[in-house]
Image (tube, helix red, strand yellow):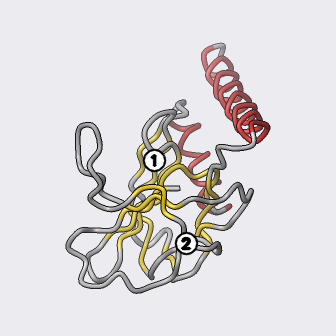
Amino acid sequence: MFVAFSLFSESLSGQKPLDLPISLSGNYGELRATHFHAGLDFRVGGVSGAPVRAAKDGYISRISVSPTGYGNGLYITHPDGTTTVYGHLLSFSPKVAEWVKSKQYEAESFSVNLTPDPSLFPVKMGEQIGKPVIPDPPEVLISILKSEIQRAKSLLILRLNRSTR
């Protein structure tokens, strides 16, 4: 799971994003092939379904769903002007997931980049906002892929139904 904190944050105090011992797989400012890494990558230790929690109070300012990049990504803007970014999520909280699904159907697209109104998804520090993707064991990835294939089929059926009217 990826969490990015603003470089100019005055304080990183707040809730740990995972209810697991902190173990980093990527550090802030770490040199990558073409850039400096702008976040902290947390290991999840193969724990399936570990809740991902908001680091501080704020509101969900951006939601992205893509087969590349962060995959399922969530951006939370905080009152102090900082933004935390949660990437590589397996799922969003149920209320966010339902809203995203409706927007995907509207757009007739799996990939979406959404900017909800600040009043739509306020979050409190420690509130569960999603679950991380677990790269191991392979059966979890298979389950994720089956889920995404089913979602794509549903969108295709919707598109076909609209075009036959």
Q: Residue 62, percent across and down?
A: 40, 57
Residue type, numbered disc 1: Ser
In this rendering, the answer to whether 129 lies above or below 142 is: below
- What residue lies at 66% left-to-right and 49% top-to-bottom? 134
Q: In the rendered view, does 106 fall on the left or right side of 75? A: right
Q: Residue 80, percent across and down?
A: 28, 83
Residue type, numbered disc 2: Ile
Q: Residue 106, percent across and down?
A: 54, 38
Q: CA distance from mark 2 to mark 1?
A: 25 Å
Q: Nearer the viewer, mark 2 or mark 1?
A: 2
| Nearest the eye: 4 or 76 | 4
- What residue lies at 35% left-to-right and 60% top-to-bottom? 39
SS assignment at label 1? strand
Q: In the rendered view, does 10 fall on the left or right side of 53? A: left
SS assignment at label 2? loop
| Nearest the eye: 63 or 165 | 63
Which residue is farthest top? 164
Tag shown at residue 22: 2
When asked about the image quadrant of residue 139, the answer is top right
Q: Residue 60, percent across and down?
A: 44, 66
Whichever of labels 2 and 1 marks the residue nearer the N terminus, that label is: 2
When asked about the image quadrant of residue 78, the answer is bottom left
Label 2 CA crowd tier, 10 Å (few <14, some 14–19, many 20+)? few
User: Do labels 2 and 1 touch, CB within 8 Å?
Assistant: no
Q: In the rendered view, does 108 fall on the left or right side of 30? A: right
Question: Which quadrant, please, contains the C terminus?
Answer: top right
When asked about the image quadrant of residue 129, the answer is bottom right
Tag shown at residue 64: 1
In this rendering, the answer to whether 66 lies above or below 124 is: above
Which residue is farthest left? 8
